[in-house]
Image: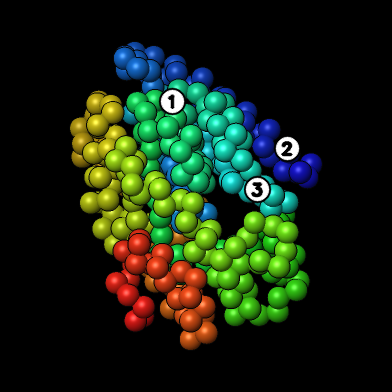
């Protein structure tokens, strides 16, 4: 880890600790729930709306003593080396969280992890996105925005065109000693979250197409665990105002179906081969005629 990144992390941790203290004082007269303050957990596949769900959940800091801990996003792979992390690493991360934290994770649906999260100690949300838009976002992010990413040098220095880069984001890099398979296999370990009733699954696109209805679903899921303590319309307004597209690179202008501008017929064929079933499973297509 670079010195600059280390100093930034220290700063973020200081801000988080300060926010916890301020929030405890700010809401000192608010009764603590019987089971303690739960952890708000945003779960996502990378480049599927992690910053968006973080912003939404951060809205709850306006009505309860939650603190945003999302400076430390758990990923199943080390950002700089690409080496895989284990279920034990995920459980260690969970053990580090405190009541009232707002956490962001790229957790596989490991049974041991789901057993912890699907309890009254957490209010979990899983956000997902059209995998075709995911690979486009991944290509731009790794190439232009993430110089310390394990695949950046290959994307920015070896691959010469965006068409080549997009192909790799679809098919992966099976030739290297890194866990970077095709998009279908990369997405598969997350699909278990869709089958858990304790987790509210949300489509990234719905925040753009029907934002109010989607945020009402977020509120409904929250209310199952905690009383809002504020009028619903006021809380809805807070969540709407908490979304700031300029601070969410994945939003990329709030476009839905942006993949159509970047996919060639070759990219379509590649994707159908490795991720066609995935699109059907997630409800983005009914078949392979797209």
Labels 2, 1: front one: 1
Between marks 2 and 3, how big is the CA–CA gap?
25 Å
Between marks 2 and 1, how big is the CA–CA gap?
25 Å
Q: Which residue is mark 2?
A: 7
Instruction: Say left or right for 147 vs 25.
Output: right
- Residue 61 in view (yes/no): no
Q: Position of residue 90 (x, y in %)?
A: 56, 36
- Front-most of residues 212 and 280: 280
Quadrant in which the C terminus is drawn: bottom left
Kindly give the residue lying farthest to the bottom in the view shown: 265
Vertical placement of residue 90 versus 167, above or below = above
Q: Position of residue 57 (x, y in %)?
A: 39, 39
Q: Which residue is mark 3?
A: 84
- Front-most of residues 163 and 60: 163
Q: Earlier in the sequence, mark 2 or mark 3?
A: 2
The residue lying at 59 percent from left, 30 percent from top is 92
- Residue 213 in view (yes/no): yes
Looking at the rendered structure, the secondary structure element under dot 1 is loop
Instruction: Say left or right for 277 vs 139.
Output: left
- Front-most of residues 43 and 175: 175
- Front-most of residues 10 and 62: 10
Between marks 3 and 1, how big is the CA–CA gap?
29 Å
The residue lying at 69 percent from left, 53 percent from top is 82
Vertical placement of residue 172 versus 114, above or below = below
The residue lying at 56 percent from left, 42 percent from top is 73
On residue 100, which mark appears?
Answer: 1
């Amino acid at each position: 880890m670079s010195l600059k990144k280390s100093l930034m992390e220290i700063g973020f941790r200081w801000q988080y600790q300060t926010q916890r203290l301020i929030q405890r004082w700010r809401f000192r007269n608010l009764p603590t729930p019987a089971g303690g303050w739960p952890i708000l957990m945003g779960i996502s596949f990378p480049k599927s709306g992690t910053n968006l769900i973080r912003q939404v959940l951060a809205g709850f800091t306006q009505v309860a003593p939650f603190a945003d801990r999302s400076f430390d996003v758990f990923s199943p792979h080390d950002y700089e080396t690409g080496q895989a992390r284990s279920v034990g690493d995920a459980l260690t991360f969970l053990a580090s969280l405190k009541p009232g934290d707002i956490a962001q994770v790229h957790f596989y649906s490991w049974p041991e992890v789901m057993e912890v999260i699907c309890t009254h100690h957490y209010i979990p949300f899983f956000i997902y996105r059209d995998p075709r838009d995911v690979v486009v976002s991944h290509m731009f992010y790794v190439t232009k925005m993430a110089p310390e990413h394990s695949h950046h040098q290959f994307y920015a220095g070896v691959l010469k065109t965006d068409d080549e880069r997009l192909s790799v984001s679809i098919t992966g890099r099976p030739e290297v000693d890194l866990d970077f398979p095709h998009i279908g296999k990369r997405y598969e370990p997350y699909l278990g979250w869709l089958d858990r009733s304790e987790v509210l699954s949300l489509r990234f696109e719905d925040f753009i197409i029907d934002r109010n209805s989607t945020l009402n679903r977020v509120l409904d899921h929250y209310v199952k665990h905690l009383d809002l303590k504020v009028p619903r319309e006021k809380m809805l307004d807070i969540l709407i105002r908490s979304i700031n597209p300029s601070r969410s690179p994945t939003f990329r202008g709030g476009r839905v179906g942006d993949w159509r501008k970047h996919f060639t017929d070759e990219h379509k064929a590649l994707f159908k081969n490795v991720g066609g079933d995935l699109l059907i499973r997630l409800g983005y297509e009914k078949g392979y005629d797209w």
